[in-house]
Image: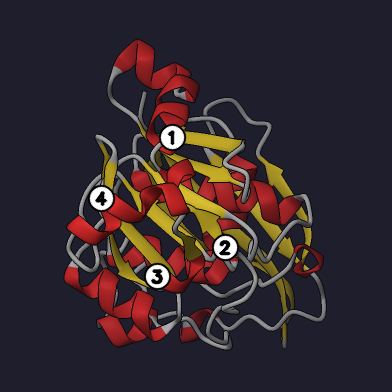
Amino acid sequence: MEEPLEIRVGHTSPAGYITTSVSITMRTPGEDRELAAGFLLSEGIVTRSADLASVIVSAKPNANIVRADLAPSVPFTPEAQSRHFYTTSSCGICGKASLAAIAVRGLKPLPRNALQFPSLLIHRLPTALRQAQATFSATGGLHASALFDSSGSLLSICEDVGRHNALDKLLGRELLAGRTPLHNRLVLVSGRSSFELVQKCIAGGVSILASVGAPSSLAVELAKDWDLTLLGFVRNGRYNIYSGKWRIIHEAQNAAELNQAPADQE
């Protein structure tokens, strides 16, 4: 199922408290609070759970509206947002004036020493992801984003018809629980890694982004600029490292395989 969701932001202004509509996105209904929170985190409107006073889903039938009220201390200027706030399930980046406008404002490169991940565990992630995709198993039509710790344990998973929505839901869930930034976590996405997915992970403080598909060239460039570890083609017992390879631990038993593989491929 795919339905529109309108995200509104309640904030203070010179005229007093007002509500501004900031986005309409096509999404799979469910976890709308998380989706809204993750979207605001990705856009740099909020950076921590304390920035949100409340996130409320409209009780009106079929309203498809969620309102996020910012804390009084959080500045918000609608005119400063360069996005023409309409996104679709296939393209969350549409409407940006330019790629430069999506730069993650106010953030620093990710810490290099926060997470190291064993390479052998990476090979197990796709199976763990697929086994946890209950809706995908029934429909075959949803993207997924999953959160793992350094032991390879699956901590959380979100599904949505839009891959950027699935990641927003995942990040929003962690934000609302006060668990961001996610420096000690790896995110695995079911499709390819786009520029926007990399940007969202940087905003959430994720150290490693892995995907079963390929990253775009702009995704690789952004990952390198912000010290994000980016893995692609994580499937069939192999994967490619595009940036941040210092976070991947190569076990001794992998030495023979590593010596035979290209420099940036496992």
Amino acid tagged 2 = Gln
| Callouts 2 and 3 close, C-beta under 8 Å | no
Q: Quadrant of the C terminus?
A: bottom left
| Pointer 2 residue | 116
Which residue sits at x=55%, y=63%? Answer: 206
Q: Earlier in the sequence, mark 4 or mark 2?
A: 2
Number of numbered callouts drawn: 4
Secondary structure type for disc 4: loop
Front in this rendered view, residue 262 or 80: 262
Residue 245 shows which numbered tag?
Answer: 3
Q: Position of residue 6 (x, y in %)?
A: 49, 49
Q: Amino acid at mark 4?
A: Arg
Q: Earlier in the sequence, mark 1 or mark 4?
A: 1
Residue 242 located left or right of residue 29: left
Residue 257 versus residue 111 in the image, above or below: above
Q: CA distance from mark 4 to mark 3?
A: 19 Å
**Image quadrant of residue 2?**
top left
- Name which residue type carries label 3: Lys
Q: Are marks 4 and 3 in contact (CB under 8 Å)?
A: no
Q: Residue at x 38, y 34 (%)?
A: 126
Of residues 58 and 27, the one nearer the viewer is 27
Residue 20 image point, x, y percent = 57, 66
Alpha carbon distance from label 3 to label 1: 18 Å
Q: Which residue is mark 1?
A: 124
